[in-house]
Image: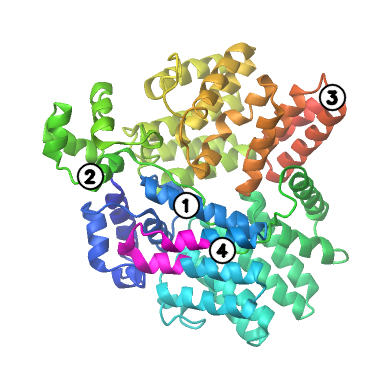
Amino acid sequence: MITIGEQIKLLINEKVNDCDFSERKLTRGICSKTSLSKLINGSTVSDPGFLKILIQRLGKSPNKLEFIAPKEYIDLVYLQQLFDDSIDKRDEAKALELKRQIDDFSVFDDYKNIKHMYSLRNEAAYEYYIKLDPARASTCIRQAIEITAPGINGSNLQEYMLSTIELENILFLCLMMTENDENTEESIRQLVDAVLSYIEQHISDREEQAYIVPKVKWLSGILFLKAGETRKAVEECSAGLELLRRDGLLQMSIPLLDVITEYGQGCDLPDQFEDYREYKDLIEKLSRKYMDKKACFDSLFLDTERAIYHYEAEVYRGQRLLKQLTQDNIADFTDSSSDIVSRYERGRRSPRPKNYTKLVDVLDIEYSKQGTFLVSENFRLLEDERTINSLLIREKYDLAEEKHRALSRKIDCSVRSNWIILTVQKNLIGLLNGTLTSDTVLKEDLDLLDETYPIHRVKVERPPFLMESNLLAQIYSCYRTIGKLDTACDLCDKVAETFDHSYVPKILQQRTVGVHVSNQPRYHKDYSYVKEAITLRLECRNLNGLDMILSSYAAHIYTTNKIISREYADLSLAAAKLHRVPNILIIKEFIEKWY
């Protein structure tokens, strides 16, 4: 297990051979070289906001690296989420008050440029969506761009290293310029094309591409519409929508679908045109049913705070530095040595339960940060894992198995989280191609679960995190396959209990809730929970897992309300088709059998 500083160093080393890379470009506008050095050698507490932009500038997704988020930062993220919601709902009074609270937040003053940049982004959103003043919004977003990328323009984009967030700022400026008619359409198109070219050359991570490229395509489509080139506009929006479909995202779907469905007729689009219409109907129907009537899906650069993860070693070191204690102080409190404490902080060793309790007490570690860990040793693990999942969805089992073997040779399997991910992948491949039985997989998975997440205790102590979620989901599936529904129900109950008595940041809960949310409605006759689950998915603009939530509820209420059950089953099938997941066959069988 490696520290965040070491991970950043590895990512920088990957870039060193690039002719256009330099540390000056990497840190320009966001920090000094000294601050970067302190982060790498572990002599400073990590600022998650700074880390996110830094990792994105290195072309990667921050969602694939777990790190400790101090409580103050979680509070700031929560305020930002509330502000984004108030903008979505056009609630002027609430937006203004939340904006003031965010601006007054003094956490992480060492990274004032980033704080000011976010403040100006919020100001631009407020002026554009609530005050309906594109000119003022344009001024604010220009200032935000200038803070972290001083001197940038459309012709010199390649001279900078930019994060996805900074590219969103530029795209928002393009939107303002389009609406204000500040520049010619040609100059705006050149800027949009320059952003797309930068993404293609510098952002290799598939997840980051899925969040930013559709926005570029939508703006490009708007420009083509203004020029009267309808077919090109529809093709651009179709390309952007396919990225969203690939990753199961709702964000930006409606603006793209509006162009496609309004102007697509007569453009000789491929067969998926009707799928697009169905996709739009699904989203609009779900949004009408579960979301606030004033909520919208067309925010261009809102909801960029997507995930905060935690990293065990960072908890220990970060909390110790914040409390101004030495490693010797911690060693005295825990009846251990400073060398052992150092190993805890470097991720070389995990404390035993007795020492862990003492560490929690002396460092005052809040519940939400206990028992956390690094998901992967490097970004390639989760990138390759996505590739394997894609192959499985397309039923290319031999290629998936080959990719899995190659992945197993590349990564450090001594890292527990890596081993869990690999085991779950191996067993999933075996189940799908018929080489493994559910009983065999269940036995191996339960042994692994007992080692890492003691679910068989009377009371589970914490919610499952990312890599455990996949393991739990596979165990549930195996239980269901062999007919042990009561045991599966008990498993879901125990996992669900962790969310009743623990503080889980909303954005983290959106990621972890998926492991049991699709199962719980089958056994818990509580409609409000299903509604909350679907609402959470919609709020984070994510289709992933929505099909199983809907189908579970359809199965649960079949005997009591067949009409609503059929409605949910149809919605579930539509979601599965549009996300292109293996659940399509399961849901089709359910519909054919019962309806």
Task: Judge by depth and name the residue closer to the eye, 47 or 202.
Answer: 47
How far separated are the C-alphas under marks 3 and 4?
A: 44 Å
How far separated are the C-alphas under marks 1 and 4?
A: 16 Å
Residue, disc 3:
561
> Which amino acid is tagged 3?
Asn
Q: Which residues are magenta?
A: 99-118
How far separated are the C-alphas under marks 1 and 3?
A: 40 Å
How far separated are the C-alphas under marks 2 and 3?
A: 57 Å
Closest to the camera, between mark 1 and mark 4, is: 4
> Which amino acid is tagged 1?
Val
- Whichever of labels 1 and 3 marks the residue nearer the N terminus, that label is 1
- Whichever of labels 1 and 4 marks the residue nearer the N terminus, that label is 1
**Is 102 one of the magenta-colored residues?**
yes
Residue, disc 2:
323
Closest to the camera, between mark 3 and mark 4, is: 4
> Which amino acid is tagged 2?
Lys
